[in-house]
Image (cartoon, rainbow, N blue to C red):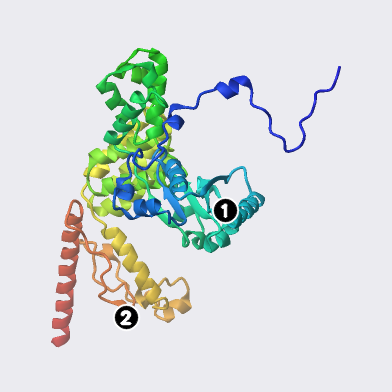
Amino acid sequence: MAAPKRRPPGSVREPSLFAARAPQPLAARMRPRTLDEYVGQQHLLAPGRPLREEIAQGRVGSMILWGPPGTGKTTLARLIARYTDRAFVPFSAVTEGVPRVREIIAEAEERIAAEGRGTILFADEIHRLNTAQQDAFLPHVEAGTITLVGATTENPSFEINGALLSRVRVFVLRPLGADDLEVVVRAAIADAERGLGAMRLDVDDAAIRFIAEEADGDARRALTTLEAAARHVGEGGRVTPEVVRESLQLRVARYDKKREENYNILSAYHKSLRGSDPQAALYWMARMIEGGEDPMTIFRRAIAMAAEDVGLADPEALKLAVAARDAYHMLGPPEGYLPLAEMTIYLATAPKSNSSKAALGAALALARETPAAEVPLHIRNAPTKLMKELGYNRGYQYAHDVPEAYIPQEYLPEELRGRELYTPGPFGFEKDIAKRLAWWAELRRKTEQSETDDAAQ
């Protein structure tokens, strides 16, 4: 039996007949070819906006396009290359390394010398570039050999080094609104050349709106859903909201536990609790659950919030938050979500006070300012005879020797006497604390007045 022929190194395998006939996905076919076809991002591309003018005039510099999936980052990069008459060269941070960067740079230099034509180096998911790859781009971006256009779903300031970030502009792309997505979907339904026009579909307006709303600002998701619905009903078929729902199957939350969206939603949850909005707090809690977040992350944030933002206005809040966490450990999901929700509602509707946080900050600052302040002798421990002879613990008065369980005496170092670090807030349990402090202050005043009168006699 003859051995199979081996392809020469570096050769490309010929595509199979079936691969050659495989149609592109609808989202790829409907990719906008001009700025006029581009939908959304009017804050960047409306007539008269600087970026649109720069693209039209062919003088675009290096940039990073930052936004959620399906908002047109790759499309915009391709349009920039087309409008500025530059070669479009994609680079994969995952599969290609520094040697490929050198090849691209060499080709860009040859292109400039031979054709006078620039190069757009498109780095999709640029946040995945390692330090060596970023450093390899840097001098060539600065020299203008290439125009770097990066696309990312993550905050560039977290992943891109400062040297490269300082040489590019960052443009933020927003999720497309439902109205924008309706435009995208209707264009695909009507386009007989690239879209689904040849299928002569009967698509309900309600189905189009349903797709637009369910896509969560993602044009690719909207077109993928439309294409699935079209396949389901076939040529000449009718697409209804029910058909769309069946084709969609599962609406997956856009949530990444390791990336910026995680911190944004966690921040929204905390701020909703602090802002006493139980409706919003429950919503963000549910978003995290649906996104697969570890409930312990939510509990940790809530426990911290209970101490930071509710504090002594309602001391029960911290107890309930800890108890809810323990209840979740006992029950597990989904029953464990009940104490999570109860805790969320309680914290959001509890009276608020950050007096404990303020007191902590003031105490730490004062401790740093006076690290050598001595403990007053009368409240020092005196376990040895020598210490007693030196005056340790002399004059200390035991609070429980009087019915009020309070005897005015100094506890702060001499140079800090009279300093107040904690001021009770006006709500909830702290109103009782304020009354108690005022009562003790009055007892202190009376004691001091009595001592003054005795000294005068």
Label 1 Cα neighbours within 10 Å, binned few <14 / some 14-19 / many ≥20:
few
Earlier sequence position, callout 2 versus callout 1: 1
Q: Is residue 316 visible?
A: no
Say what secondary structure mark 1 lies in.
helix
Residue 217 left/right relative to 294: left
Tell me where residue 5 appears, x and y as whole percent. 80, 26
**353 shown above or below 318:** below
Tell me where residue 178 appears, x and y as whole percent. 28, 34
Residue at x-position 19% and y-position 63% = 437
Q: Which residue is mark 2?
A: 415
**180 shown above or below 142:** above
Q: Which residue is mark 1?
A: 115
Choose top left, top right, bottom left or bottom right for residue 435: bottom left
**420 shown above or below 238:** below
The three-letter amino acid code for the residue at tag 1 is Glu
Residue at x-position 26% and y-position 51% = 310
Residue at x-position 41% and y-position 21% = 228
Q: Nearer the viewer, residue 128 or 100?
A: 100
Q: Quadrant of the N terminus?
A: top right
Quick one: which residue is furthest to the right in this view?
Answer: 1
The three-letter amino acid code for the residue at tag 2 is Glu
**93 shown above or below 328:** below
Tell me where residue 206 appears, x and y as whole percent. 25, 22
